[in-house]
Amino acid sequence: KVKLKKDSTHRCEDCGREFSLAYNLKKHRRTHTGEKPYTCKECGLSYSQSGGLRNHILSIHRSDRVFTCHYCGKGFPIKDRLKLHLRTHTGEKPYSCPHCPKTFARGSQLSQHLRTHTKDRPYTCAECGANFVCRSNLLNHVKRHQNEREFVCHKCGKSFIRRDGLTKHLVWYHANYKAFECKICYKKYKGHLLQHMRIHMAEKPHACSQCHMRFVQRSQLTVHERTHSGIKPYRCAVCHTAFAHSTALKMHVRRHTGEKPFKCLICPPGEKAFSQLPHLKKHMLAIHKTNEPYICTGCKSHFKQKSQLMEHAEKCEKLQTKPTHEAPVVAGMPLDRMRLLLAVLLQKISTPEKLKSLGYGKRLIDHVLRDSITQSGRDACKETHLNEAETLKRNVEILLEWTVPKMYMDRFKQERRTIVDLLEEFTS
């Protein structure tokens, strides 16, 4: 008869957690190393555990959801998901904090909350000084500074730093279903109404310890606290200007790339576009006398909110008969990311006088690159059947073949390095 040692434990060197089985420690270690051996054949998303991949396939790629909520009719592929969802209707919060009166609907929410009571945060960010309970949280945080967005939506090309950000995006924007209606203003939401209801109740549970300003969301408080600390963790890769908020950095980068993603669909095509949504709204009100900037390209109906347009798009017959185009993403890299790296590269290899003559910083970076290639006596890509992401990628390839010595380009091709790989390497 084999006797098992009861005191046999396997300790994680990163966070100190102990496991009775080596197999469980091996699975846990992936949260620190980032190893994700289980890959979805549909969209390429990877997971550290087989259960995560299984849940992803059932939630995102399968339509035969069998567990139905009797409150709102929403379906779930997994019974446990339905059980958690029901708590948004019943208000049940079975997980209690032993240190304070707060309760939570999920065990993971309680675990996260408990860290607010413990001051032990041994992992520190060298960039901004933020402290974390475990190494994996620090690694996720560092990705924000480096703007690493490895999780790319296979439907629209938008990228995210964290997997849960991608998951939330897929549910909110590509599963156009809103089950929760506010009984005060009648707005509909896909998630529970807790944060929205705080607006009506004037509830602001998150207080600043220095000036006592209060906020609806914890993230709002975090950004506000930087006005006291002076911390600016988000840095522009082109000019190295630092910002306190990621959104401010995103808008700033458009000054380098020339991107104007908010287009007026009433003006002639390509005539009016803006780098910020408020500028488009101001234009719509002043010129077109409407406060509804979102327009259906199929039936020309106007909408005040993007969510209203998306809901309409699901039903619009004229829109559904129009041909669809590929999302602006190439080889896992979103178009805005490619433009940013190109702006960095052009600044590295060109003189300020040359960039100024090309309109760098005032024109779309795609056009700056195209004219730079043309002025060198080479032919830029003008193939009309390619979308703008593919056209830009081809012109970047022409630029690299022109500026990188042939012996290096030949070696890169032998190594099967993609143009996107080279763009990342040359700008790092």
Image: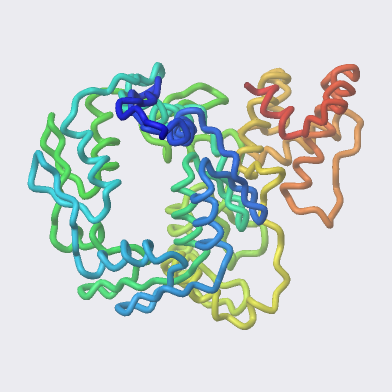
User: In which quarter of the view is residue 413 placed?
Assistant: top right
Percent position of residue 13, x then y: 40, 20
- The C terminus: image quadrant: top right
Q: Is residue 251 left or right of residue 217?
A: right
Residue at the far bottom in the pictured view: 317
The residue that appears at 71% across and 58% down in the rendered structure is: 326
Percent position of residue 26, x then y: 48, 32
The residue that appears at 25% across and 64% down in the rendered structure is: 87
The residue that appears at 61% across and 58% down in the rendered structure is: 155
Asked if 78 appears above or below 50 in the picture, the reply is: below
Which is more toward the observer, 45 or 322? 45
Report if residue 364 is visible in the image: yes
User: In which quarter of the view is residue 2 placed?
Assistant: top left
- Which colour style is shown? rainbow
Q: How many marks?
A: 0
Q: Is residue 193 left or right of residue 372?
A: left
Asked if 116 appears above or below 105 in the picture, the reply is: above
Asked if 355 appears above or below 393 in the picture, the reply is: above
Which is more toward the observer, 418 or 350? 418
The residue that appears at 71% across and 62% down in the rendered structure is: 325
Percent position of residue 261, x then y: 57, 51
Report if residue 290 is visible in the image: no
Q: Is residue 51 left or right of residue 351?
A: left
Which is more toward the observer, 134 or 126? 134
User: In which quarter of the view is residue 18 placed?
Assistant: top left
- The N terminus: image quadrant: top left
Percent position of residue 35, x then y: 55, 33
